C-alpha cells in the first residue's frame, strides 16, 4: 500500500446493492453528459458508483451528517491498468490512473450470480478502456 505523508493513497468503497438505473436520484443523473448512457449502478447507504459508456462516476458522501459530498469522475482514457479480484462473497475491481491515483471498488455480500455480473461489468469496462485508448 502506498502512502504519502502517512495518508493512504488508495480510496476504498464497499458497494453491496445494485441500483435501478431508472430510479437514480437527480443529483446523480445531473452529471451525465448529453447522450451518455449509464450501464450499471451500485451503492451503499450513502455512496454511489455509476458506470457509463464514457466514464466512472463515484459519489463519496462524507461526514456524520452526510452534507459533504465528493464527486469523482474517471474518464476511461485516464485508466492505465485494471485488475479483478475474487474472494468468498466479494469481488473487487482495482484501477490505477495515469496520475498514480489508485481506486478499489469492493462489491460485498455477492452470490455466485452477482460475481458473474461484476465480471461482465469488468469486461465492459475493459472493452470501453480499450476503445478509448485506440483513438
Image: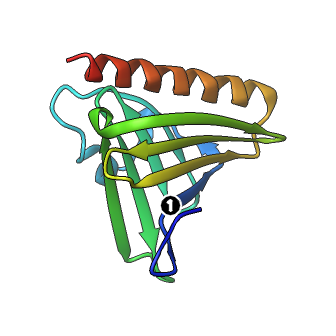
Residue 106: x percent and y percent?
63, 48
Residue tagged 1: 11
Farthest-out residue, left: 34
Q: Nearer the viewer, residue 27 or 23?
A: 27
Q: Residue at x 43, y 62 (%)?
A: 60
The image quadrant of residue 17 is top right
Picture quarter with the N terminus: bottom right
The image quadrant of residue 115 is top right
Q: Residue at x 32, y 59 (%)?
A: 71
Residue 75: x percent and y percent?
28, 38
Q: How many marks?
A: 1
Q: Residue at x 15, y 31 (%)?
A: 34
Q: Nearer the viewer, residue 115 or 78?
A: 78
Dot 1: few (<14), some (14–19), or many (≥20) neighbours within 10 Å? few
Residue 54: x percent and y percent?
28, 30
Q: Is residue 88 left or right of residue 14?
A: right
Q: Is residue 24 left or right of residue 12?
A: left
Picture quarter with the C terminus: top left
The image quadrant of residue 79 is top left
Amino acid at each position: 500500500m502506498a502512502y504519502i505523508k502517512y495518508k493512504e493513497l488508495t480510496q476504498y468503497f464497499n458497494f453491496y446493492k445494485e441500483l435501478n438505473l431508472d430510479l437514480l436520484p437527480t443529483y446523480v443523473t445531473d452529471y451525465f453528459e448529453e447522450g451518455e448512457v449509464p450501464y450499471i449502478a451500485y451503492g451503499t447507504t450513502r455512496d454511489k458508483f455509476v458506470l457509463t459508456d464514457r466514464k466512472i462516476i463515484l459519489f463519496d458522501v462524507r461526514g456524520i451528517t452526510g452534507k459533504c459530498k465528493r464527486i469523482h469522475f474517471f474518464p476511461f482514457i485516464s485508466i492505465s491498468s485494471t485488475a479483478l479480484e475474487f474472494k468468498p462473497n466479494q469481488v473487487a475491481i482495482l484501477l490505477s490512473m495515469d496520475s498514480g491515483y489508485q481506486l478499489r471498488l469492493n462489491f460485498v455480500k455477492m452470490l455466485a450470480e452477482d460475481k458473474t455480473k461484476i465480471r461482465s461489468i469488468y469486461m465492459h469496462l475493459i472493452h470501453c478502456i480499450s476503445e478509448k485508448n485506440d483513438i
